[in-house]
Image (spheres, helix red, strand yellow):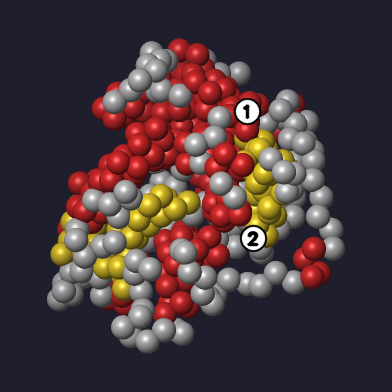
Amino acid sequence: MRKRIAILGSTGSIGTTALRVIDGVNASLTEEEQFKVVALSGHSNVKLLAEQVRRYQPRYAAVSDTDYVSRFQRLVEGQNVQVLAGTEGLKKIAEVEEVDTVLAAVVGAAGLAAVLAAIRKGKRAAIANKEPLVIAGKLITSEAKKCEAQLIPVDSEHSAIFQALQSGRHNEVEKIVLTTSGGPFRGARPENIHDATVEQVLAHPVWRMGRKITVDSATMMNKALEIIEARWLFNMTPEKIEVLVHPQSIIHSLVEFVDGSVIAQMGIPDMSLPIQYALTYPVRMAGIAKKLKAEHLRTLTFEQPDFRVFPAIEMGFEVAQKGGTAAAVFNAANEAAVEQFLAGRIKFGNIVELVRHCLENCNYRDRATLEELLEADAWAKKEVMECLKNHQLR
């Protein structure tokens, strides 16, 4: 196992859970066997990042929001830690020799350069945030193959598929099925959720996640992004990817093989298990994840997603098929729109409307460089703001 860990986004929900996972695994290991936290990064919550530095004694710590670097330096004064700043700081952490596994849990495109840097150094990239594979899936997977780096998904659905795929070869896969809880608006009518409040949107019935991800679950934009991710991560054409609503979130995803066998990965809705698997793979170890019991399996239900309520899913298939800069535009437009919704400046229904507008009006490129992908990302965010300024929303 690769045990020298860097956590990019250690102050977020995935990052804090990852540190608890490491504590839980280390509790049963000798000091020589234990996982070592070599580097941490946060965005603006420098108080928590400083507490983590004092507890885990990493060699490096990065603050991606450069406005908070000075404050962080004062908070860690006297600690034996090298302080880095900005997206360049994230990239440096990913490249240092002392790190062999980079857990990427940075929201938005900010972590993309760091993920690529880790891959080009032949490290294990445990990817929790969707953006790197959505924006630059083709580039990342080709670089990983060339540099013999490992890509291990942390997202619960992709972790489930990754685990299930161990049961067969790639050419034996008939299809992969991404499950979704359906979010807070499962069974709703489109006209009844257009004006949904922030409080209603954030009231997820199953998962406890960050605000942005919870909004994505309500629009099902998260599933659209996962379709694009799965297309690259598992080298599957969109025709071999399906989405199935499973409200209990016990079956995290399934793989159907050509002989008719269906392999499902099950577990309590809890991110600690996929995080731990990404860190310990290919070994399984005792940890902090809650155990699945028979009573959890009494009622498992499934239904097809309603594309009228959740048009984002169909857009996800469309973008996965198209490739190029479409995915960068799709992701960035959603990111900007969600930010505006959470700030109270647009309605819930405007999120998907803005994403569709950007897709239809972008300067699409089929074969795009990293610079062109980042340009597309920047254009989409700017275009969302232009739409708001020009009152182009219903």
Above-or-below relation of 135 to 355:
below
Image quarter of residue 218: top right
- Residue 169 x, y percent position in the rendering: 56, 46
Frontmost residue, 1 versus 361: 1
Given the image, on which type of amino acid does mark 2 rest? Pro
Provide the secondary structure element on which disc 2 rests: loop
Please tell me whether mark 1 or mark 2 is closer to you in this view.
Answer: 1
Above-or-below relation of 263 to 366:
below
Above-or-below relation of 187 to 375:
below
The residue that disc 2 covers is: 269
| Residue drawn at 37 percent across, 16 percent down | 365
Frontmost residue, 15 versus 11: 15
Is any atom of residue 229 visible in this view? no
| Residue drawn at 71 percent across, 58 percent down | 250
The residue that disc 1 covers is: 239
- Residue 131 x, y percent position in the rendering: 42, 40
User: Alpha carbon of mark 1 to alpha carbon of mark 2: how far?
Assistant: 28 Å
- Residue 26 x, y percent position in the rendering: 42, 80
- Residue 294 x, y percent position in the rendering: 79, 70
